[in-house]
């Protein structure tokens, strides 16, 4: 596994050429960098603000949340924590169809018919028929994983439906991007940002180093380096083995020195 700090984020690198050189330095092969999966696959979804199903006349009032829902391939995995579900589901589903069900339906509204269970593509038989909650005094919580055949982008905005023990639809909430659409950048979200962290940290440190080199006098740089080296040597010298924590590894002075040396190396190679 090679780690190279380019200063670019993932989307900057996407589409660029990956070149293989031979022993003599000549370019021998080329391929373009592409995402392993579409970035939108990383969307996390959540259904909150449950409302009574549009034609439900009973007195069960569901609240709580379903999610975060993550999609891996075409499988949705999600936790749920709900109140006000059917207390009759204390032993799980009964014999009625959709009894105690907790399902994604293909409809995209809670103001009208939410249509049938959602599944698509390679999934040709209903994966939701056996998916049900078990309640304790009208509350329920758990984790489910259902292969719907759809991506996160296919599932977003669809209706999450909670069923009663008799199979009737009692509550509805739409699956929305979570934590918030404003956190989604270029179709990715915070999970994507995590994967970009090497590039992002590189960019920030690169900018900091650039500003430092541009802004400080040579003597100040020497002082900076000496301080960093002295800082590194001033660690305890007792016989106790020194614990290296992530905080120490992230010491900006050490990173700065490493990056400085890197930029020197780059210059030498140029
Ligand atoms: Cu259903």
Image (cartoon, grey):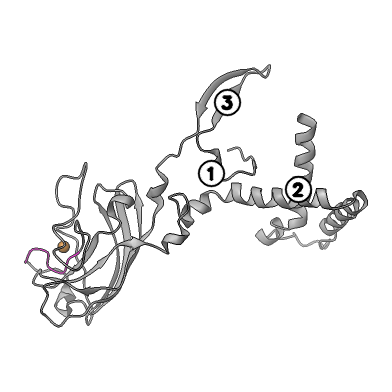
Side of 118 where 222 appears, left or right: right
Residue drawn at the location 21% of the way across and 63% of the way down: 109
Distance between mark 3 and mark 2 Cα atoms? 27 Å
* Residue linked to disc 1: 10
Secondary structure under the numbered disc 3 in the rendered image:
strand
Residue drawn at the location 14% of the way across and 83% of the way down: 59
Secondary structure under the numbered disc 2 in the rendered image:
helix
Name the foreground residue: 118 vs 250. 118
**Do the residues bearing badges 2 and 1 touch, measured as CB atoms within 8 Å?**
no
Whether 262 is among the magenta residues is no
Snapshot quadrant of residue 135 = bottom left
Distance between mark 3 and mark 1 Cα atoms? 17 Å
Name the foreground residue: 102 vs 120. 120
Whether residue 151 is situated above or below residue 17 in the rendered picture: below
Ligand 1 found in image quarter: bottom left
- In the picture, the quarter occupied by the N terminus is top right
- The mark tally for this picture is 3
* Residue linked to disc 3: 19
Residue drawn at the location 40% of the way across and 42% of the way down: 37
Q: Residue 125, how many percent across, how many down?
A: 14, 48
- Circle 3 crowding by C-alpha within 10 Å: few under 14, some 14–19, many from 20: few
Whether residue 225 is situated above or below residue 55 in the rendered picture: above
Name which of mark 2 and mark 1 comes first in the sequence.
Answer: 1
Q: Residue 17, how many percent across, how many down?
A: 54, 29
- Circle 1 crowding by C-alpha within 10 Å: few under 14, some 14–19, many from 20: some
* Residue linked to disc 2: 210
């Amino acid at each position: 596994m090679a780690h190279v700090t380019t200063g670019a984020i993932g989307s900057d690198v996407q589409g660029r050429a990956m070149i293989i050189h031979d022993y003599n330095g000549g370019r021998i092969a080329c391929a373009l960098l592409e995402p392993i999966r579409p970035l939108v696959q990383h969307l996390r979804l959540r259904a909150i603000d449950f409302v009574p199903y549009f034609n439900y006349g009973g007195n069960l009032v569901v609240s709580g949340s379903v999610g975060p829902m993550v999609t891996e391939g075409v499988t949705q995995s999600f936790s749920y924590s709900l109140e006000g579900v059917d207390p009759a589901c204390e032993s799980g589903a009964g014999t009625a169809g959709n009894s105690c069900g907790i399902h994604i339906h293909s409809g995209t509204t809670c103001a009208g018919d939410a249509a049938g269970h959602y599944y698509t593509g390679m999934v040709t038989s209903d994966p939701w028929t056996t998916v049900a909650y078990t309640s304790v005094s009208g509350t329920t919580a758990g984790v489910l994983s259902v292969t719907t055949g759809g991506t996160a982008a296919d599932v977003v905005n669809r209706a999450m439906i909670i069923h009663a023990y008799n199979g009737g639809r009692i509550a509805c909430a739409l699956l929305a991007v979570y934590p918030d659409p404003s956190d989604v950048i270029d179709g990715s979200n915070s999970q994507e940002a995590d994967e970009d962290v090497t590039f992002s940290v590189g960019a920030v440190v690169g900018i900091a180093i650039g500003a430092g080199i541009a802004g400080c006098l040579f003597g100040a740089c020497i002082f900076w380096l000496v301080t960093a080296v002295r800082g590194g040597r001033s660690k305890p010298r007792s016989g106790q083995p020194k614990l290296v924590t992530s905080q120490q590894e992230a010491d900006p002075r050490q990173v700065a020195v490493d990056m400085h040396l890197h930029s020197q190396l780059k210059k030498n190679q140029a």
